[in-house]
Image: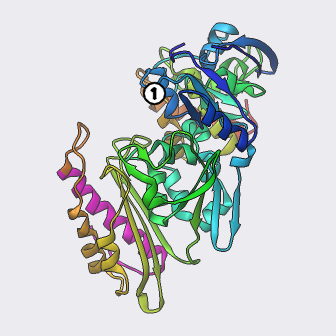
Amino acid sequence: MKPAPFDYHAPQQLQEAANLLASLPNAKILAGGQSLVPMMNFRYVIVDNLVDLGGVDDLRGIAIADGWLRIGAMMRQRELETSPEIARLCPLMAEALRHVGHRQTRNRGTIGGSLAHADPAAELPAICAAYDAIVHVASVRGMRQVPFGEFSTGYMTTALQPDEMIAAIDLPVWRQGHGFGFQEFARRQGDFALAGAAALLDVGAGGVVRRAALSLFGVGQTPLRLEAAEARLNGQMLDTTLIRSAAAAAWLTEPISDIHASADYRRHLAQVLSARALTDAARRAGVDVANAL
Amino acid sequence: MGKRATRVNVNGKSYARVVEPRLTLADFLRHELNLTGTHLGCEHGVCGACTVLVDGRSTRSCLMFAVQANGAEVTTVEGLSPEGTLSVLQQAFIDNHGLQCGFCTPGMLITLTELLRETPDPSEQEVREALTGNLCRCTGYAGIVAAALDASKRLRDGGS
């Protein structure tokens, strides 16, 4: 037994989970456990109480209403990866999920857990950033909605208070026929990305960009929306030159340096992967463009 | 810290134990049930040696507490075929030199059992992607991938 001792709680209802989280000392949520349990095994994290959400059915399911897709926080990554609704309505997420950890960790890992853990190199927070997702946060005080731009507040830090948990994530469904692209660079399949980019493009008649979203991960302390690139794309005729010019905005980022990659190398990757993600998105939106980078 | 009653069905047999919550499923299988076929390498979710099926899904048993498996059905390498026999996949590992020291083999077999159930005719790329979560440090992966592809063919041909 490697973790320090703790008491275990397995609520069946969301309200019960919120009550436990608010009343127990030094309590932490256990979702899929694929990041938390390694940290407990190393004793980086020592808790007195673990509240396991595995039995809370209120936190499961996928629902579609009024142009929004609602995903329960305890949906396993692999359930989302193989979901026909996600593939049809949110294909960018379906593509990104294939890069999340390994098959065995996706079988347990959850979308809510990934967002709450907030690793800057993680894929799912970058997808939520690209979609301007709404995070539904539950506690004994009830529910509140947090736009994803305000949810991610710093390196592995979120807007969640100690007694709060993610209940669901809302994603706006983009028009059928929109383009999407997802690119990441890692040393091996399943490793944490050194850098990555996720792109969405809605292209109107004549190849004019109606709406663009581009987010980067593994580059900053949080997922980054590359707004300068989006501004360059919006309202313009989509072609290779435009994509190259938009991707150049990645030079404005100030990436982290660590033993895996220097800031300069990450900035280079951010530009190349942005161009490739935008190129994939353009082609899927029906615009034939040459490789930009 | 309070112990908890936990009942887990492992390889078709039901086991009830009262355990500390911090006991991982891997240690539960090895120390409480003496099912030592499940190996433990890194104990932090990197090597994949401890992979078992939980309700049919490949899972790292070092990243799950036994109390979380309460009511679940677990399959370990001991449960892949009846005692004294080998599954088609296990036989293919022998025939294709898919193991040398054998330490990673239980995890490899479990992951590939799930893959072949979900994807009966995988490409080499699909096999390699499925195995990214299982580290082998001696035979290399050539024999393991060959064994997986051979097993998939034998199973599609009626399995022998």
Residue A265 covered by magenta stretch: yes
Q: Please state if B96 lies on the left or on the right of A262 as rendered.
A: right
Which residue is outermost to the bottom? A206
- Determine the main secondary structure of the stretch shown in magenta: helix
Q: Residue at x 40, y 40 (%)?
A: A191
* Residue range (magenta): A264-293
Label 1 secondary element: helix
User: Residue A33 falls in which quadrant of the image?
Assistant: top right
Kindly identify the amino acid type of the residue bearing the numbered disc 1. Answer: Met
User: Residue A76 falls in which quadrant of the image?
Assistant: top right
Residue B104 is situated, as x and y percent measured from the top left of the image, at 51, 21
Query: Where A229 sits versus B19, above or below?
Result: below
Q: Which residue was labeled with disc 1?
A: A39
- Residue B34 in sight: no
Q: How is the image coloured?
A: rainbow
User: Residue A48 falls in which quadrant of the image?
Assistant: top right
Q: Please state if A154 lies on the left or on the right of A136 as rendered.
A: left
Q: Quadrant of the image for the N terminus of chain A?
A: top right
Q: Which residue occupies the foreground of this view, A227 or A100?
A: A227
- Residue A106 in sight: yes
Query: Where A183 sits versus A230, above or below?
Result: above
Residue A276 is situated, as x and y percent measured from the top left of the image, at 35, 65
